[in-house]
Amino acid sequence: MTRMFVNTKIRLAKAVEAREAGQGTLEYLGIVVVVVLLVGALITAFTAFDLGGKITEQLDKIVP
């Protein structure tokens, strides 16, 4: 009877380990996706709204 409980506990522990095996990869993939979205948003902001020109204009006002 005790052997059955021990074997069941071992089986459950192995099942949990198998489920979490790819978790780190998914987390890294999520981070990469977020970084790509942020870089895309920055590029869009600098090109579509001429943010680079506006920043340069304001810096020229500060530094004669």
Image (spheres, rainbow, N blue to C red):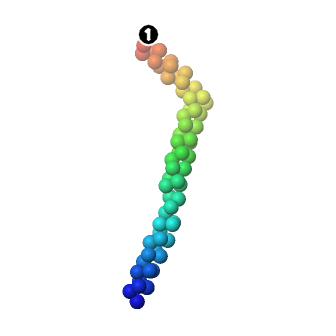
The three-letter code of the residue at mark 1 reads Pro
Q: Is residue 63 left or right of residue 32?
A: left
Q: Residue at x 49, y 55 (%)?
A: 24
Q: Quadrant of the N terminus?
A: bottom left
Instruction: Identify the secondary structure beneath mark 1.
Output: loop
Rendered location of residue 31, percent (x, y): 51, 47
| Residue, far top | 64
Q: Report the residue that reaches farthest toward the left.
A: 2
How many circles with numbers are drawn on the protein?
1
Measured as percent of width and height from the top left, residue 48 is found at: 61, 30
Quadrant for the C terminus in the image: top left
Is residue 35 placed above or below 46 in the rendered structure? below
**Coordinates of residue 43 in the picture (x, y in percent):** 57, 32
Name the residue furthest front.
Answer: 3
Give the residue drawn at x 55%, y 37%. 39
Up the image or down, 40 lies above or below 54; here it is below
Depth check: give the residue in front, 49 or 8: 8
Question: What is the residue that sits farthest to the right in this orientation?
Answer: 48
Q: Nearer the viewer, residue 53 or 24?
A: 24
- Quadrant of the rendered image containing residue 5: bottom left
Instruction: Please tell me in which quadrant of the rendered image residue 62 appears.
Output: top left
Task: Give how far across and how far down residue 23 sits, in percent.
Answer: 50, 58
Quarter holding residue 37: top right
**In the image, what residue occupies the spot 56% across and 41% down?**
36
Mark 1, residue position: 64
Q: Residue at x 47, y 66 (%)?
A: 17
For label 1, count other residues whose C-alpha is less than 10 Å away and answer few (under 14), some (14-19) or many (20+): few
